[in-house]
Image (cartoon, rainbow, N blue to C red):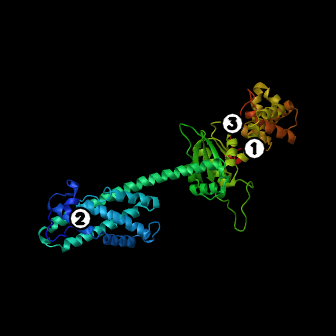
Amino acid sequence: MTTSPPGAPGPTPGRPSDPHAAPGAHTRLGSAGGSGAFRRSLAAALLTDVDRLTDRAVEDIRAHSGTYAAGDPVTREDLWGICRDNMLRALEDFGGLAPTGGDFEGAARETGRRRAEQGVPLDIVLQAYRRGGRILWQVMAEHLRTRTGREADSRDLELDVAGAVWETIDRYSVAMADAYRLAQLELQNQQDTRRTALFEALLDGRAEDPAVAAAAAAALGVPAQDRYVVVVATQDPAAPPRPAPVLEAQGLWSFWRPRSGRYAGVVRLPRRDAPAGRTPSPPGAGPDPALVRLLDALRERTGATAGVSPEFERLSQAGRALRLAEQTLRTLPAGSGEAAVFDARLPEVLLSGRPDIAERIVTVHLGPVLGTGGERTALLSTLRVWLDHGCSASRAADLLYCHRNTVLNRIGRVAELTGRSSESGEARLGWALALRALPFAGLPDAPGPTPPVADPAGQGGADRDPYGT
């Protein structure tokens, strides 16, 4: 039977030192010799009063932490139970005693896992560990001060005990923090998986069920009803677009996922500003600054070609908006880096789905022009610029770097070839529609859209439709 040092608390009834000791265990704490024997007897003495020790630690933690004092999400009973488990394991570990329930650090890992699930910040949990360790050392110091024969070996023994107890607390803190971070990572993965599944449900049209829509809104962290658009962007496998950080820098929330070789995203637009005493302008009343900002960011910062749906109010409408955004994207030249809104591409959306009708429109309204060979490119370019700028010969001449009379002669030539008057609104409508139908007509020699012309005045976007035309 191991004999305790003079004046040390004796072994607890039912907890004799030797039968519970773990021979050879915890040599890192210096369990050999008189110091080890003293730590065993000290731990055994404190274990007899572990409930009161736990009470003291719990009150100290709650007194120094508003989170724990509030009782939510960690109740006093929860804190007391897990505090007791940690005290029990720490004392057994400190004293070199055999664990009475599982491995020594199991309670620490359980603390980390549970607090991560409850959302308690890690620094708050670590602070509680430090408070608990402080209480444990205070109680041990009280035993050291009152023991008999203290003067002879006081300094070395107290230093050994202090080092051993704080080494134990440090190891438990590390085990708890590691378990916390692992649990937090697992929770994040679960949340990401759930968020992605609900996002896919939105795009698949399953959010017509109010419960699905509400769950998706909660998972994404946005209101179920607000100002939204869906964006579909081409995905370059070598360098997929990363729209979320780009849009966030512009003050626009978004959530994106790869989908069928593309990226699909829901973007939340800020509310339209209105002067005091006036109601906000209805959709379509004028260029929306938030939507213009979205298009500019997509064009200039992502390099992706993107189609944007019309604005919608309820997340449950995201499935229909996705289809409209995809239709918009199909009207844009692949790899162009262009971004456009559905409403600005209505003719193209209609024509892209009916190449037979597109071909007929081109043949009826511009067929003779396409047959002019080398003259064709100049005629089509001039006609496009002239129509896009209010049928102004002067403005078209400035943009094309030619004389006004050259523009008038080319428009006259188009009118002659097609047998239509350039003053006729119907003729102008037919020509404009035919120009838009060219990329979808399926004609082997049909030219694509004319590249943007230079602006000698340096005005650039001043004449560009903010929604992508």
Q: List the single residue furthest toward the bottom.
A: 146
Q: Earlier in the sequence, mark 3 or mark 2?
A: 2
Pointer 1: what residue?
A: 346
Examine the rendering and report whether any part of residue 164 can be seen.
yes
Pointer 2: what residue?
A: 15
Image coords of residue 295 (percent x, y): 64, 48
Locate the C terminus by quadrant.
Answer: top right
Query: On screen, 420 above or below 107?
Result: above
* Identity of the residue drawn at 33% across and 65% down: 130
Residue 99 horizontal side relative to residue 441, left or right: left
Crowd band around label 1 with a 10 angstrom C-alpha radius: few (<14), some (14–19), many (20+): some
Examine the image and state in which quarter residue 33 appears: bottom left
Check if mark 1's residue and mark 2's residue have beta carbons within 8 Å: no
What separation in Å lies between label 3 and label 1 (alpha carbons)?
Answer: 20 Å
| Residue type highlighted by circle 2 | Arg
* Identity of the residue drawn at 15% across and 71% down: 7
Residue 408 horizontal side relative to residue 189, left or right: right
Crowd band around label 3 with a 10 angstrom C-alpha radius: few (<14), some (14–19), many (20+): few
- Between tags 3 and 2, which lies in front? 2
Image coords of residue 368 (percent x, y): 83, 28
Q: Earlier in the sequence, mark 1 or mark 2?
A: 2
| Residue type highlighted by circle 1 | Leu
Pointer 3: what residue?
A: 451
Locate the N terminus by quadrant.
Answer: bottom left
Examine the image and state in which quarter residue 234 appears: top right
- In this orientation, which residue lies closer to the viewer: 451 or 5? 5
Crowd band around label 2 with a 10 angstrom C-alpha radius: few (<14), some (14–19), many (20+): some
